[in-house]
Image: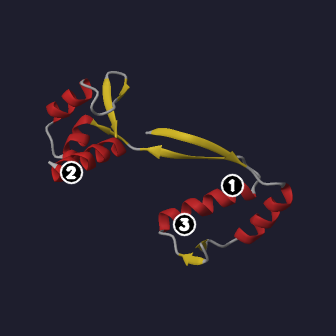
Amino acid sequence: MTLDGPKVTGLDPSEQAALARMLDGGRDVTVFVDGTAHRLAPGARDAVVDLLQRLGRGEAVTVASVAELLTTSQAAELACISHTFLRNMTDRGEIPVQYRGTHRRIRRDDILAWLAAQKTAGTQG
């Protein structure tokens, strides 16, 4: 996994205390987007509560997206192509690749983008 674009946030002491009081013993969080309430799935809810609890304790928090890296075998399976064909495409630079030592890793988003391009090319040709 790779981290993309970390951002550090913090709260002033009065906001920390207010947030800590609100979260004391509670785990129910309602998220409003454009005035509409949304219930988060348990994993997302737990992540938001954890973030808020850390901010309430005055901790600095880094928020970053994580790009999922796949092995070439996993990427080939996702794309329904052979492992050898995928390796050849990475050698030619058609699909970006990262190396972890001698092992190739491919971002899931890059495979999905390649698949979308193939689908578009297939409908145009």
- Disc 2 on helix, strand or loop? helix
- The picture quadrant where one finds residue 29 is bottom right
Whichever of labels 1 and 2 marks the residue nearer the N terminus, that label is: 1
Q: Which-is-in-front pick, marks 1 and 2? A: 2
Colour convention: secondary structure
Q: Which disc, if any, is residue 54?
A: 1
Give the alpha-carbon distance from disc 1 to disc 2, as whole Å: 44 Å
Q: Residue at x 24, y 24 (%)?
A: 91
Helix, strand or loop status at disc 1: helix
Q: Residue furthest front?
A: 124
What's the mark number on residue 45? 3
Q: Residue at x 39, y 44 (%)?
A: 68
Q: Is residue 58 above or below residue 111?
A: below
Horizontal arrangement in the rendering, residue 19 relative to residue 107 (left or right): right
x and y, in percent, of residue 9 in the image: 71, 49
The picture places residue 1, in percent across and down from the top left corner, at 43, 39
Given the image, on which type of amino acid does mark 3 rest? Arg
User: Which x, y percent locates residue 102?
Assistant: 32, 21
Q: Position of residue 23 (x, y in %)?
A: 70, 69
Q: Residues within 10 Å of mark 1 (few under 14, many from 20)?
A: some
Q: Nearer the viewer, residue 2 or 24?
A: 2
Instruction: Confirm or deny contact between disc 1 and disc 2 (CB under 8 A).
Output: no
Image position of 18 with respect to 64: above or below: below
Kind of residue at badge 1: Arg
User: Tag on residue 119?
Assistant: 2
Question: Residue 9 vs residue 30: left or right?
Answer: right
Q: Tell me the amino acid under the disc marked 2.
A: Lys
**Residue 37 quadrant:** bottom right
